[in-house]
Image: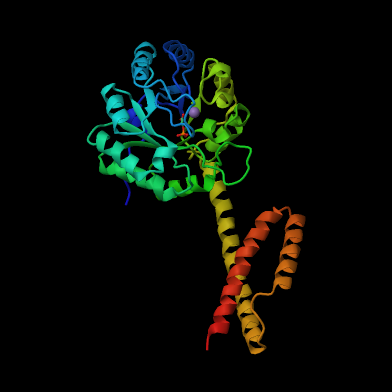
Amino acid sequence: MELEINPIRHWLPQINNPLIIAGPCSLETEEQTMETARMLAKDHRVFVYRGGIWKPRTRPGSFEGIGSIGLKWLQMVREETGMPVGTEVANAQHTEEALKAGIDVLWIGARSTASPFVVQEIADVVKGTDAVVMVKNPVNPDVQLWVGAFERLSQAGIKNMVAIHRGFTPFRETEYRNYPNWKTVIELRRLMPNLPIICDPSHIGGKREYLYDISQKAFDMGMEGLMIESHRDPSCALSDKEQQLTPADLAKMLDRLVIRNVTTDNKIFENQLELLRNRIDAIDTELIETLSSRMEIVRLIGQYKKDNNVTAFQVGRFSELMEKRAKLAESLNLDPNFVVQLFQHIHEDSVRMQTEIMDKP
Ligand code: PEP
Ligand code: MN
């Protein structure tokens, strides 16, 4: 089922570039809010001003947001700069207040998306309005939970929706604050091809130095924009100080990013791409035929082992195979880890097939 979703330009007609949303992690004072907004408004690539006022903090005791007074500051930003404004809502009360204040963009944070009750509570409040609602990925890489949030909003009649990729809680030590796990984003694209997706490199990276690489990767992957935290003076920010950029540094970073087109009208390019894709299709066909021949032999071996009463899985053979394949891969300019993983799958299926043969009466 395809949900009815509007493209970004439907609710932001002035957009002529990727959607860049920027602003502080948290609104702290009226002065910080306004000054940061004035600086960002000078950059015509920034289309929406963001500012958190109800902050979901992992542990209590740190700055939990300025609260409802921030809605007034956001209204002042829009009045003075003309920029649409957005904030995070995490329950029915936030949502009611934000709608009442005429906040242009609401977003559901990563911790909230992981909770269907919270998403439903928010969906019930926005029901029947033409609100713009963005949904960050859930903290855990469960694409169904992410899709579920859009379905709940869609059932409430919301059509102005955008997904924000902000990375996932890492399950091992990584340089980034949140693991980008791009394959979950690709999966969302496949499941909901008409849903605009933007990237939040600030919460993925956790540090300023990583923002450029993550943002470029997002554009290379065909994402439609960025949400980036920007503060007039990150060194004294009350939250996420390590990952915020000054508006001047944000502008420098945007200058360096190469924005790619998802499609093109260039016929020569289209023809070349078509030729290369035909070659890939032919190679993939060969790969599958080769795998099929390999499996034929695996079956023969299975029968042979059965006749001689030998186990299907033999660890010595497995280690030797992996070692040889990794070496060959390396000599052919392939990533040996990738090839080892591929052969783990192939070997797993070979053992499965052999045990099936053995279990047959
Ligand atoms: C934020 O955008 O400031 C925020 C809290 O993000 P997330 O929900 O991605 O952690
Ligand atoms: Mn933040």
Of 51 and 62, which appears nearest the observer?
62
Q: Residue at x 53, y 41 (%)?
A: 221
Would you say 337 lies left or right of 229 here? right
Q: Nearer the viewer, residue 200 or 206?
A: 206
Residue 132 in percent (x, y) is at: 33, 31
Displayed quadrant of residue 96: top left
Residue 278 in which image quadrant: bottom right
| Figure colour scheme | rainbow
Q: On screen, 74 above or below 282?
A: above
Regarding residue 227, the answer to whether it shows in the image is: yes
**Above or below for 199 versus 13:** below
Horizontal side of 19 relative to 345 (left or right) equals left
The percent position of residue 49, horizontal first and vertical second, equals 42, 21
Whether residue 196 is visible to the viewer of this picture, yes or no, is no
Asked whether, in this view, residue 274 is left or right of residue 83, the answer is: right
Q: Quadrant of residue 295?
A: bottom right
Task: Count numbered badges in the picture.
Answer: 0
Q: In front here: 243 or 118? A: 118
Say whether residue 190 is left or right of residue 220.
left
Q: Position of residue 193 (x, y in %)?
A: 40, 46
Residue found at the very far front of the displayed protein: 61
| In the depicted structure, whether residue 62 falls above or below residue 278 | above
Q: Residue at x 33, y 25 (%)?
A: 104
The percent position of residue 85, horizontal first and vertical second, equals: 38, 22
